[in-house]
Image: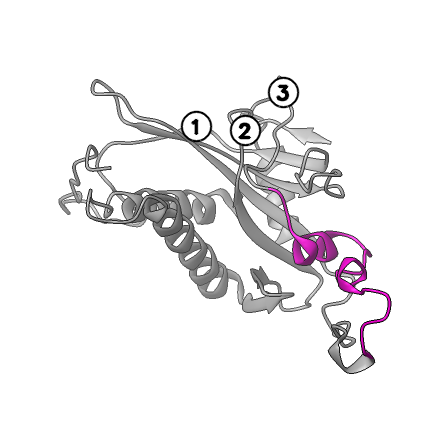
Amino acid sequence: MLIAAHELPRRDDRLALLGTSWPVMEKALRMSEAGLRRVTESHGRTASGQYAYHERLAALRSEQKVRYGWENVSRFQIDLTVNPERTIGIQTLSGDANTGSTGAVPRSQHPRGPNGRHLLTDEDPFEQLSLPGLPTELLPRPAEPSDLDGLQVWVFLTYRKPETDSGPAKWHSELSRPGPPDEQGYLTSWHERILFPDLEIGSVVFPEDGEGMEPIDIPVGFR
């Protein structure tokens, strides 16, 4: 099922059933941009992606906690926000240029490893690591039963279109429930996609900023 960004109130009703909303995602995107803009030429080459991810994750988790009572959880070493019933979880990943598009199917920017596969499927993440003849005490131990077993995981998928000298940064995003990763580990199929409007960010202004407050104007061209 595909719900386009302009399909209101259908989009917002579906988000409400999941226990979230567009303002949560918008705040996360703005924090992601703010994190990315902290990077200077003195940072490492992967810093911009890492800063953007961690700020986006932190905002997503804190907004879900404050607004809806969700919890911060690490499942198979993957950071999630999980509803109080522990039936739905959200993680955030970077996607490709098709993210948020009605005309094409996106895929994750990076392949998922054994833990990422196990989070979305029943595949045992330790099978590939179990070698014939390896002593039992050296074999990886499977995950213990958990109240998170059967968790339905959704992905807040984002793509930042590189800014130009004449225009602001633009973020494309969606909240979607992925199918199993492909053979290479990429997410390429989706059971359900909820698309969000493109978000252009010049100055970093958060949705709850009050009237009369000056926006935080952070220049873009440092990377």
Residue 67 screen position, x and y as percent: 47, 60
Label 2 vs label 3: CA separation? Answer: 9 Å
Up-down: is 134 above or below 68?
below
Residue located farthest toward the bottom when viewing the structure as drawn: 137
Residue 174 screen position, x and y as percent: 55, 36
Q: What residue is shown at x 63% (from left), y 58% (from top)?
A: 89
Mark 3 highlights which residue?
A: 104
Q: Is residue 198 left or right of residue 10?
A: left
Q: Amino acid at mark 2?
A: Gly
Up-down: is 6 above or below 13?
above
Decide which of 22, 47 is in the foreground and name it: 47
Q: Amino acid at mark 1?
A: Asp
Mark 1 highlights which residue?
A: 198
Q: What residue is shown at x 49% (from left), y 42% (from top)?
A: 22
Decide which of 56, 65 is in the foreground and name it: 56
Are circles 2 and 1 on residues that touch, CB within 8 Å?
yes
Q: Quadrant of residue 203?
A: top left
Q: Is residue 153 left or right of residue 67?
A: right
Q: Quadrant of residue 214?
A: top left
